[in-house]
Amino acid sequence: MTDTDFTTTGPLAPEDITAESPFTLPGFFEALAEGRVVAARCTECETQMLPPRPACYACGSRAVTLSDQPRTGEVISYTSVNRPPSAFEHLAPITVAVVELDSSARLTGRVAASLDEVTIGDRVELRVCDPEDVGIDPGFDLSYETEWPVHVFDLV
Amino acid sequence: MSTAHLIAVGASPLGKTDLPGRDLFSRALAEAFAELPDPADVVDGVYVGAQSERYENQIMQGTLMAEWAGLRNVPAERVEACAAAGALALKNAVRDVRAGVHDAVLACGVEKMTAGGTEGATNALGAAFERALEQRSGITAPATYALLARRYLHETDATERDLGRIAVKNHRNAADNPRAMFQDAVDIETVLDAPEVAPPLKLYDCAPVTDGAAAVVVANDAVAADLRSRPDAVRVAGVGSAANNLAVAERDLTFVEGANVAASTAYDDAGVGAADVDVAEVHDAFTVCEALLAEAAEFAPQGRGIETVEDPEDRSAGWTDVRINTSGGLKARGHPIGATGLLQAVEAYEQLTGRAGQRQVADAETALLINEGGVADAHTVAHVLSAN
C-alpha cells in the first residue's frame, strides 16, 4: 500500500472536495474504474477507510490522506443473500463477504463463488466490473451512479 | 432538571392489518388516552418515529399525527434512524420534558410495512445500509445480520441451535402477550428446519414484517401527579444513544460497541448498573442480536449472550438474573420498524406497573430498553425506566 500521487493531506479545504478527487464518490469510482482501490488513510492512527472520507472515525482526526490499496485480502465473515433486493433478484443466491484487505481496510462485496466454497480466512482478490456486465437492474442506479463500477471478490 | 415519566401507553394490533398508518396511530392513541383528557389538554409537542416514506408515500408524519390527535400549531416532528426511530422519538420527548421545554410530549411511532409486500419491505429497509459499496453489493437486512452471526459462531462456542433457542424462547414469551403478532409457541426442530434466508440465519431467526403503531405519553412531575396515581407512572431514569459506523464492514462484528456506549450512558444517567436491571427489552431483529445485546448491556460475559434463554439459576457465572424480551421481542411480538422502540417501552411500562399478566416478572422495578437502527449498532438508543 502506498500513498497515491494525490498529495493532499487534511484537513481538506473546500476546493479539495471536487468530483475529480477520490475523497468524493465520483472520484473514488473513477479511480476504481481504472483499477485503483483508493482509501483514506489517517496519518494519526493509520486507520484505512473505504470509501475515502474527510475525517477518521477511529480517532477523530481530519489529517487524512489518500492511499492506494492492495486488491488482496481475506474473508472475515460471509453469507448468502437468498432473497435479494428486486434489482438483484436474478443473481440470487448472492454470496457476500466482509473482506479485510492486506492493508487492514475492510469492505463488503459479492464473492464469485457459491456459499459452500467460501469459509472464514479464505484469500480473495478484488475485481472491478461494469454494472451492466453483472446484470444488476439498470433501474437500481441513481442518475449519477450509472457510470460507477461495482466490485466483486474472486477466491484465489 | 425536571423528571420525565411515562404516564400512559398504547399500541395498535400488530401484524398484517387492513389499517393504514394513520389509523394504526389512531388505535394506539385511543388506548393511551383512554383514561386521560384530550391530547390537546395534555401534551404540547409530538415526535413520530417512522422508518420510511416508501411504504405509504407519506412524509410529514409529525404534522399528520399531531392533527389526528387534535393538536394544532404545536411542535411536531418525524424522527428517523431506521429501526431506532421509535426510541429516538421517546428520547426527544424525554429531553424536552427534562429541559422544561414542554410539560408533556407525545412520543409515537408507526409503520405500515406490509403495504408493498415482502419485496417492498426489503427494498425500503435496504435504504438503511451504506449505499456506495454495501447496497450496491445486493445486501439485505438478514444478510448483514448473517455476517454478524457467522462471525459470532466462528469466535464463540455458540451454534445455530443456540441461536434458534432464542427464537423458541421469544415465541414462548409472545404466547403470554395479548399484544403479540405471534401467539403460538414453536419448537426448536421447526426453527432449525425452516428455510435459510441468509445462512446461518433461517426464517425463525428473523423478525417479521409487521404493521403497527405505538404511543407513549411523557410528562413532568406536575402533569404526572395531576393525571395519574403514583404507581401508574413510570420514571425515565436514564437515557443514552450512540451512532457507530454505517457500513457493517467497518464494525466489530462480535461486539456492538455503540450499544455498549448507549447502555452505559443510560446506566450512568440513571445511577444504576447492569445487575440492577430486572427486565430488558433488547432489539432482537435477528436472534444473534439478542446474544450480542445481552453482552453489550453487560448482562452476560463476552461469548455467553446465548444464555439469554436460560433461567437465571442455570446461566454461567458473570450473568445477571435479568429477564430478556418478556414481550416476545421483535421476533414474536412483531417489528413495525418505527414503532418498535415504543413497543419496548409499552412492555416495560406494563412490567413496572404490574400489568404484564402471565408474563409478569415478580418485583420488577428497573427496566432497560435497547432499540437499534441500521445494521446492529449503526444507531442505538437506550433507556432505563424505574417503577415509582
Image (cartoon, rainbow, N blue to C red):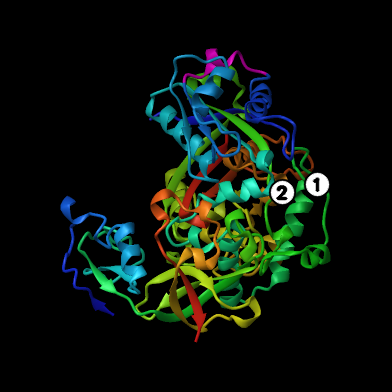
Q: Secondary structure at mark 1?
A: loop
Real-space CA distance between mark 1 and mark 2, rounded to the nearest whole angstrom: 8 Å
Establish if B96 lies above or below B117: above
Q: State yes or no: discs 1 and 2 in contact (Cβ < 8 Å).
A: yes
Residue B298 versus residue B39: which sits nearer the camera? B39
- The reply to whether residue B133 is in sight is yes
Q: Position of residue B324 (x, y in %)?
A: 65, 53
Q: Quadrant of the N terminus of chain B?
A: top left
Parent chain of label 2? B
Q: What stretch of residues is rendered in magenta? A: B35-44
Disc 2 crowd rating (10 Å Cα; few below 14, some 14-19, many 20+) is many
Residue B208: % across, % down: 70, 49
Q: Nearer the viewer, residue B265 or A26?
A: A26
* Residue found at the very far front of the displayed protein: A132
Please tell me whether mark 2 sits on a helix, a strand or a loop: loop
Residue on which the image places disc 2: B328
Q: Check disc 1: other Cα within 10 Å, few if <14, some if 14-19, many if 20+.
A: many
Q: Amino acid at mark 2?
A: Gly
Residue B361 in view of the camera: no
Q: Say the numbered circle drawn on residue A153.
A: none
Magenta stretch contains residue B292: no
Q: How many marks?
A: 2
Q: Give coordinates of residue B77: x percent, y percent.
A: 46, 29
Q: Quadrant of residue B157?
A: bottom right
* Left or right of A154 in this view: B282: right
* Picture quarter with the C terminus of chain B: top right
Which residue is label 1 attached to? B175
**Image point (74%, 39%), residue name:** B16
x, y percent for residue A116 = 65, 80
Of mark 1 and mark 2, the one earlier in the sequence is 1
SS majority, magenta: loop
Residue type, numbered disc 1:
Ala
